Every structure is written in C-alpha cells, then in structure tokens.
Image: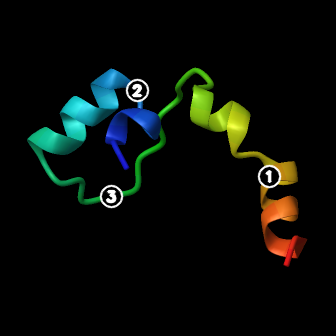
Amino acid sequence: MSLRYLLPADGVAELLGSWPDEPRLYEREATELDRHVNEGFFETWAFSG
C-alpha cells in the first residue's frame, strides 16, 4: 500500500528521509480509502462468511 494513502505529503517525505525514533502523529484529509474502508466495511467483511 502506498504511504500517500496513510500520510499527508509532508509526512511521506519526512518518513522516507529518515526513520523516526519516536511515535509521530500526522493529520490528513480523508481519502477515497477512508471513505470506502470504514466500520461497516469491516463488519460486512468479517461476518459475510
């Protein structure tokens, strides 16, 4: 999975530039992935057989 789906652009650049030595929190806008993979998606996936 591409980092751009998980992090904002500056977070991707920072992570690729150096490995963090402490936890970091990045704020980003919702993406298509966020709109598709939600609680209902996981419930359907887990209990659909």
Q: Which residue is mark 3?
A: 22
Judged by depth in the image, the label closer to the viewer, 3 or 1, is 1
Q: Residues within 10 Å of mark 2 (few under 14, many from 20)?
A: some
Where residue 9 is drawn, which disc sits there? none
Q: Judging from the image, what secondary structure is the residue with disc 2 in?
A: loop
Which quadrant of the view contains residue 35?
Answer: top right
User: How was the colour assigned to the protein in this rendering?
Assistant: rainbow
Q: Judging from the image, what secondary structure is the residue with disc 3 in?
A: loop
Find out whether the residues at labels 3 and 2 contact each other: C-beta distance under 8 Å.
no
Q: Residues within 10 Å of mark 3 (few under 14, many from 20)?
A: few
**Which residue is found at the position 28% from the left and 34% from the top?**
12
**Which residue is found at the position 32% from the left and 23% from the top?**
9
Q: Which residue is mark 2?
A: 8
Q: Is residue 28 above or below residue 16?
A: above
**Which residue is found at the position 78% from the left and 60% from the top?**
42
**Which residue is found at the position 89% from the left and 73% from the top?**
47
Q: Is residue 40 above or below residue 17?
A: below
Residue 19 appears left or right of 35: left
